Image (tube, helix red, strand yellow):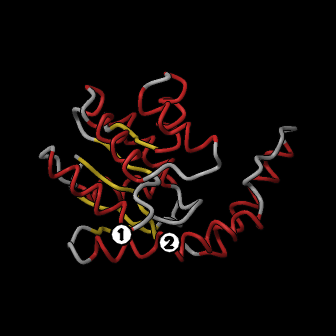
């Protein structure tokens, strides 16, 4: 099964992708994690990506798609994969679709996590408070100002990708505001797992 998990920052995509990876053997593919791994391995893709990052530039879509293509051909993706955080733009979605078609591995579904923005802010506040209560350092992105900026970028750049996949009839929606366990059940039901 080949999936994209789609939704704003803090919607629970990563949590649910990790669960499906552990329970169903679907590989979670996070472009950020993949880039870090490629750079650490000093692979050709990693060297290429690092050259852009070192100049403060975004890694081009062609490099990201090549990296994903390399990953989906690995044995740990034999049962399928979940893209988490990619594609973020329509050109990325088009490039991804072309690459998957070339490899005869089309997407099965795009799972949209529907969330309430106010609840996302409450989640960030609660997570930061809980981290402080545990005596740990709060992550730099666990604050309302950063979340607001990320949501603004999501709405301007990434949300149009949802329409792209809706036009293809691929979007299935879940209520991301439910308890983690309930969202998991809903995803399993939605995907027939």
Q: Nearer the viewer, residue 40 or 141?
A: 40
Element type at mark 1: strand
Is tag 2's residue or tag 1's residue first in the polypeptide sequence?
A: 2
Which residue is found at the position 37% from the left and 60% from the top? 92
Mark 1 closeness class: few <14, some 14–19, many ≥20 residues within 10 Å: some
Side (left or right) of 131 relative to 148: right
The quadrant in which residue 125 appears is: bottom right
Seen in the picture, residue 75 relative to 142 is either above or below; the reply is: above
Residue 129 point in image, percent of width and height: 82, 53
Q: Nearer the viewer, residue 153 or 179?
A: 153
Q: Which residue is mark 2?
A: 157
Element type at mark 2: helix
Which residue is found at the position 47% from the left and 30% from the top? 38
Which residue is found at the position 76% from the left and 66% from the top? 144
Furthest residue toward top: 41
The quadrant in which residue 135 appears is: top right
Mark 2 closeness class: few <14, some 14–19, many ≥20 residues within 10 Å: few
Residue 117 point in image, percent of width and height: 62, 75
Residue 113 point in image, percent of width and height: 44, 65
- Labels 2 & 1 near each other (Cβ < 8 A): no
Residue 151 point in image, percent of width and height: 61, 70
Q: Nearer the viewer, residue 38 or 15?
A: 38
Which circle, 2 or 1, is nearer the viewer? Answer: 2
Query: Which label sits on residue 173?
Result: 1
Mark 2 to mark 1 CA distance (whole Å): 20 Å
Seen in the picture, residue 20 relative to 74 is either above or below; the reply is: below
């Amino acid at each position: 099964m080949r999936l994209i998990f789609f939704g704003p920052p803090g919607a629970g995509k990563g949590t649910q992708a990790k669960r499906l990876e552990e329970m169903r053997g679907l590989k979670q593919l996070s472009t950020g994690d993949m880039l870090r791994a490629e750079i650490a391995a000093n692979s050709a893709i990693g060297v290429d990506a690092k050259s852009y990052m070192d100049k403060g530039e975004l890694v081009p879509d062609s490099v990201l798609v090549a990296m994903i293509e390399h990953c989906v051909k690995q044995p740990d993706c034999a049962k399928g994969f979940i893209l988490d955080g990619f594609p973020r733009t329509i050109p990325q979605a088009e490039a991804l679709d072309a690459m998957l078609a070339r490899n005869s591995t089309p997407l099965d579904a795009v799972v949209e996590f529907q969330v309430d923005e106010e609840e996302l802010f409450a989640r960030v506040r609660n997570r930061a408070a809980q981290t402080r209560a545990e005596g740990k350092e709060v992550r730099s992105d666990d604050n309302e100002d950063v979340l607001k900026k990320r949501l603004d970028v999501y709405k301007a750049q990434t949300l149009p990708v949802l329409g792209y996949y809706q036009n293809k009839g691929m979007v299935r929606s879940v209520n991301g505001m439910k308890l983690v366990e309930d969202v998991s059940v809903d995803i399993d039901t939605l995907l027939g797992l």
